[in-house]
Amino acid sequence: RNAAVSAEVQGRLQELYVQEGSRVEKGQVLARLANEDLRAQLARAESGVGVRHAAIEEARAERNDAENELRRQKALSERGLGTESALDAAQARRDVNAARISTATEQLSAANHKLRQVNATLAQTHHDAYHDGLTKLPNRYLLKDRIRQLVERSKRDQEFRFGVLFIDLDD
């Protein structure tokens, strides 16, 4: 029988383990996708969150400075020493920085959403690599990975012991 094969996630093909027309077994890994693109997306998303945090802090500092200047201009104006244009400029500067904070906060929210999406995609990709696509049950690669972890732990800790009971229910 022939079958069409496609990946559930997009990515660049890193390794192909079969050739066209090859006979394959159920559960056999056919190819491996590179995850550098997804890791780069994660790095960009994390950086975006950091940039938005910095923009908020900068806008807050500017707003605080503008509020101080507005207070000074109001005090001068009340004593008849300030000009209306200086007072208007101070109010405008404060309002502009309040708007910058609002915009940067919205951008931070969007950046956090993007970061959550990329993390969810990365987690799903990792889950899919170790679980059967049809049954969603753990596959042999997860078993091999867990056994490898146990072997590594037993090398570090001589008193750590483990056992594996493997029952193959297939043909």
Image (cartoon, helix red, strand yellow):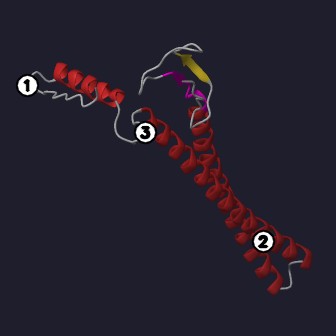
**Residue type at numbered disc 2:** Asp
Residue 159 circle label: 1
N-term-proximal mark, 3 vs 2: 2
Residue designated by label 2: 95
Residue 69 magenta-highlighted = no
Q: Could you tell me which residue is drawn at 57 percent across and 24 percent down?
A: 2
Within 10 Å of disc 1 (Cα), the crowding (few <14, some 14-19, many 20+) is few
The part of the chain drawn in magenta is 30-37
Alpha-carbon distance for marks 3 and 2? Answer: 48 Å
Q: Is residue 111 left or right of residue 133?
A: right
The vertical placement of 34 against 128, above or below, is: above
Residue 67, horizontal then vertical, whole percent:
71, 71
Q: Secondary structure at mark 1?
A: loop
Which residue is at the front of the view, 70 or 104?
104
Judging by the rendered image, the residue that carries numbered circle 3 is 127
Q: Residues within 10 Å of mark 2 (few under 14, many from 20)?
A: some
Task: Please tell me which residue is depicted at 18% across the width and 21% down the height of the picture.
Answer: 156
